[in-house]
Amino acid sequence: MTKCRVAWIACAPLVCAAFVFAGCASESGGGASTIDSGTPGSSFEEDSGAASGDAASQNADSGSRAEIDAGGASECVVTTTDAKLDALATASTADEYALTIDAAAASATSWGESGNEALVLEIRNGAYLIGHMVLHQGADRFSYAMHLGALAAGDVISVRVSPLSAPAATKSACISKITLTPASAMGAAAEGMTHAPIVKWPKQKSFDDLPILLGWSKAQKNYQLTYTNENGGTTALCGGGARGVRSEIARWGRGLDMEGIYGYGGAGHFERCTGTVAPSAGVPRMENAHPVVYYGDGHNRLFESRGGYGQACGTGSDAMADGALAGWNTSNPGNDPSQDDAYSIVLRPLPVDMDALGVTQFGGRREAIVDTYAPWLYRLTNLELKREGKIDDTQTFDMTRYLMVDVYAMDVGGSGDATCGPSSIDPSIGASASGGFVLRANAGTVVSSGPQMTADYFGGENNVKRIAIPLAPGVAPADITGFTFDAYDDDGIYFMAIGDAFVAEPSGSNGATLTYVHKGKTSYGRYVDDDSSGCNGGANINGGVSYPCAGSFFSFPR
């Protein structure tokens, strides 16, 4: 059984500027200048020299080795409070920049504790608010990063504790390392940073459905945003609360939410709450090459201003799952950007590389960015769902009860979802499914079954799908001996391979470890069919390839 530890080192998920693509830069090179607790009181000078090597050709998996240091902060370079602005760094040349800080909150915040979720920092250039950093790992030392946009030579980046911080959090943070990296030092990764979206989220939702992980595809020139959860969408349409989250997990294999949001290739595209549109004047508004996007509705779809929520983005319960939001759909003084700071938390996550994980080949591989760069996100989602009363241990469970498995298959048929029944929002929804398959995890004589997965949610004729199997009580990852792929209703399916299979387990205050039952892709290439009508001589031929017929189910070891 393989352990993937999520802990702190000099580089961590969402940090080290482009180094989620290029590996961690040393303090003495790579175009990034750093001060840390080993050099207290030293002057900061950003190094604009070019990075060595092509960022795109180096290790894209560096974020997976990141660790959270539960021992708290080391010696502080800067101790920031809400009393004043503290200087962090000065840009020596005009360029676009990324900022990385290693930081720990002064008090033990917890994402699952209402009123004590996290400390929030403001990052400013003079009086201008660039954006916020949410210290979601609390008092555990962690590396946080954001893209700053364009800076002029001599611009001073400063920090202070934001009033958006949780009320119970001590209004102080220790910053033990500061790294400022210019786009000119990032190689191929600079493209991802210089087009990265800026997200303006309701301040009322600073710890709710937070857009926290940004994926970037250089090949497709687009971005995907990962949120800690969604209050609307599937959750609301399928009954809300634990009942709705059960369907969210059954359909998508996760409690967190992922949405494609923006593409800059060709004519470009903006995933607006009203439908995908080509960018046009003000839709969305741009800061240089960065689109500025806003919370649009409970599906976590976006709009070009605060004026979409509860209006153009819809007024149904699934769209307005958060009710009235002052500054957005009520008490809105107008949608001019000059009014935004009073009503928004501004998030500028640094993108991570999706291409290296196979997302361009299989859309269903997109969950791998969380596994690779930000496993702690599973813990945040788990804590948030508990805080909101959406885990009831009957319909939904703690994250340690779910085995996440990547299944590769072709020709998945069927329709429906057996977990989502009629709700007040849509009484026409039926809780039934036909065809498709069920994946089961075997632990001796104890069998844990996943949801019945059909073509409606599999996502393509030839794809990979993340399946979340609720484990029977008492079953641990080490107990699992194998799996069974079970085709339903005479629906012949090509079971191609199994990928990663793991359970997320707590680590530190708000982090997670991934305990693997199976790591990597193991190919099987079996044709699974209840009635074997597609078989001739014990095989099914498709595209000139012979697939052995397995009967109505196929079992294989972990």
Image (cartoon, helix red, strand yellow):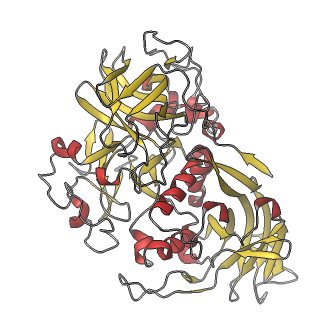
Task: Provide residue 551's location: percent of width, then percent of height.
Answer: 82, 83
State whether residue 237 is above or below residue 377. below
Foreground residue among 324 and 226: 324
Whether residue 82 appears in this view of the structure is: yes
At 40% across and 65% down in the image, what residue appears? 231
Foreground residue among 284 and 70: 70
Quadrant housing the C terminus:
bottom right
Task: Provide residue 434's location: percent of width, then percent of height.
Answer: 60, 87
Q: Is residue 7 left or right of residue 388?
A: right
At 76% across and 60% down in the image, what residue appears? 477
- Quick one: which residue is furthest to the top in this view? 42
State whether residue 169 is above or below residue 100. below
- Quick one: which residue is furthest to the right in this view? 537
Residue 404 is drawn in which quadrant? bottom right
- Quick one: which residue is furthest to the left in this view? 333
Q: Is residue 211 left or right of residue 275?
A: right
Task: Provide residue 82's location: percent of width, then percent of height.
Answer: 31, 31
Task: Provide residue 409's location: percent of width, then percent of height.
Answer: 68, 69
Q: Is residue 153 left or right of residue 141?
A: left
At 62% across and 64% down in the image, what residue appears? 466
Q: Is residue 236 left or right of residue 280?
A: right
Whether residue 463 appears in this view of the structure is: no
State whether residue 91 is above or below residue 557. above
At 60% across and 55% down in the image, what residue appears? 361
Badge count: 0
